[in-house]
Image (cartoon, helix red, strand yellow):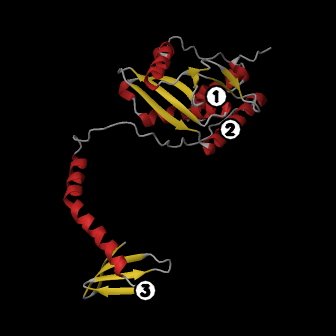
């Protein structure tokens, strides 16, 4: 008889990544593992996984030192209060905010914040759903000696799709029906702006920056002129024309301008 701590009795955060992923082979293997038809993959020889394990304590300590936030509930396993087949083994919870804490190790040459969020989105959304958290923190140490903190909010739509996919997968575990990929696209998470970036090496940035500086004064004069022209337009006027400029008032009261040449309208200015 299986006990409640056996991973075959529930879907965890790392399982959610596979269920919401695009590798059918991994999905079938997970299904077989949950049914007890095959043993879980031995990750003891996977160096990246082991580096993640041995750096968890350092990751947590570094996060607490840099943010002054204490982490509690370390390695606590939580079951969803309604869906008992859902559980989360937490790296921790941030005491002050109630956010889910997730510690990760990633290789420096393949690291990008957007890719990290996409890779771990299902796990984070799953864990947030299980413990009813609104936010989560991804704390990443890279092999290049870099530490990155990324805050991800709960996404109700994605969590609904996640729950639907996990429920279908669990039904397959119970019935023996082989699951198929669910094809859910990972949402693009809006990252918190925390970095200061030097764009001096970008030629495109240089071109646009030069254009911005060249036209900044003219743009300011342009906006100021529009503002003053609006003030001059009589309140009962639907349209006004003079000196090559036509002003029009819409039914909603918005005023737009257009340059007028002898042949008619030259350009519209909003």
Q: Secondary structure at mark 1?
A: helix
Q: Secondary structure at mark 3?
A: loop
User: What is the distance, in whole Å, between disc 3 and disc 1 at their CAs?
Assistant: 68 Å
Q: Is residue 232 above or below residue 65?
A: below
In whole angstroms, how far apart are the C-alphas of marks 1 and 2?
Answer: 18 Å
Q: Residue at x 22, y 62 (%)?
A: 217
Location of residue 179 with respect to 68 vertically, above or below: below
Q: Which residue is identified by label 1? A: 28
Q: Which one is earlier in the sequence, the residue at label 3 or at label 1? A: 1
What residue is at 76 percent from the left and 28 percent from the top? 84
Q: Is residue 91 visible?
A: no
Q: Position of residue 91 (x, y in %)?
A: 57, 21
- Closer to us: 215 or 35: 215
The disc label shown at residue 163, or none: 2
Instruction: Evaluate if marks 2 and 3 touch, with contact meaning CB atoms under 8 Å apart.
Output: no
Q: Where does the image place residue 258, in percent across and percent down from the top left? A: 32, 78
**What residue lies at 66% left-to-right and 34% top-to-bottom?**
132
Which is nearer the N-term, disc 2 or disc 3?
A: 2
Query: Quarter-wise, where is residue 108 in the image?
Result: top left
Which residue: 63% across, 40% down?
A: 159
Instruction: Give the spatial CA distance, label 2 vs label 3.
Output: 56 Å
Which sits earlier in the primary sequence, circle 1 or circle 2?
1
| Neighbours of disc 1 within 10 Å: few (<14), some (14-19), many (20+) | some
Give the x, y percent position of residue 100.
58, 29
Asked if residue 85 shows in the view, the reply is yes
Q: Where is mark 3, residue-wise? A: 238
């Amino acid at each position: 008889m299986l006990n409640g701590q056996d991973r075959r009795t529930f879907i965890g955060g790392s399982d959610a990544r596979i269920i919401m992923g695009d590798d059918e082979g991994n999905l079938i293997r997970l299904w077989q593992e949950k049914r007890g038809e095959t043993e879980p993959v031995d990750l003891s020889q996977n160096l990246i996984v082991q580096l993640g394990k041995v750096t968890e304590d350092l990751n947590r300590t570094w996060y607490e030192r840099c943010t002054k936030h204490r982490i509690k509930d370390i390695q606590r396993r939580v079951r969803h209060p309604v869906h008992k087949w859902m559980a989360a083994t937490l790296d921790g919870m941030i005491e002050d905010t109630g956010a889910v804490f997730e510690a990760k190790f990633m290789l420096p040459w393949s690291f990008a914040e957007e890719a990290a969020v996409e890779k771990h989105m299902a796990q984070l959304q799953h864990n947030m759903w299980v413990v009813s958290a609104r936010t989560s923190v991804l704390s990443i140490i890279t092999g290049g000696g870099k530490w990155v903190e990324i805050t991800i909010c709960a996404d109700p739509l994605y969590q609904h799709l996640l729950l639907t996919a996990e429920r279908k997968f669990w039904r397959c575990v119970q019935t023996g029906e082989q699951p198929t990929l669910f094809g859910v696209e990972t949402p693009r998470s809006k990252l918190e702006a925390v970095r200061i970036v030097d764009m001096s090496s970008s030629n495109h940035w240089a071109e646009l920056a030069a254009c911005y500086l060249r036209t900044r004064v003219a743009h300011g004069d342009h906006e100021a002129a529009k503002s003053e022209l609006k003030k001059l337009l009589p309140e009962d006027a639907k349209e006004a024309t003079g000196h090559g400029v036509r002003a029009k008032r819409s039914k909603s009261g918005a005023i737009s301008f257009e340059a007028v040449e002898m042949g008619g309208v030259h350009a519209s200015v909003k």
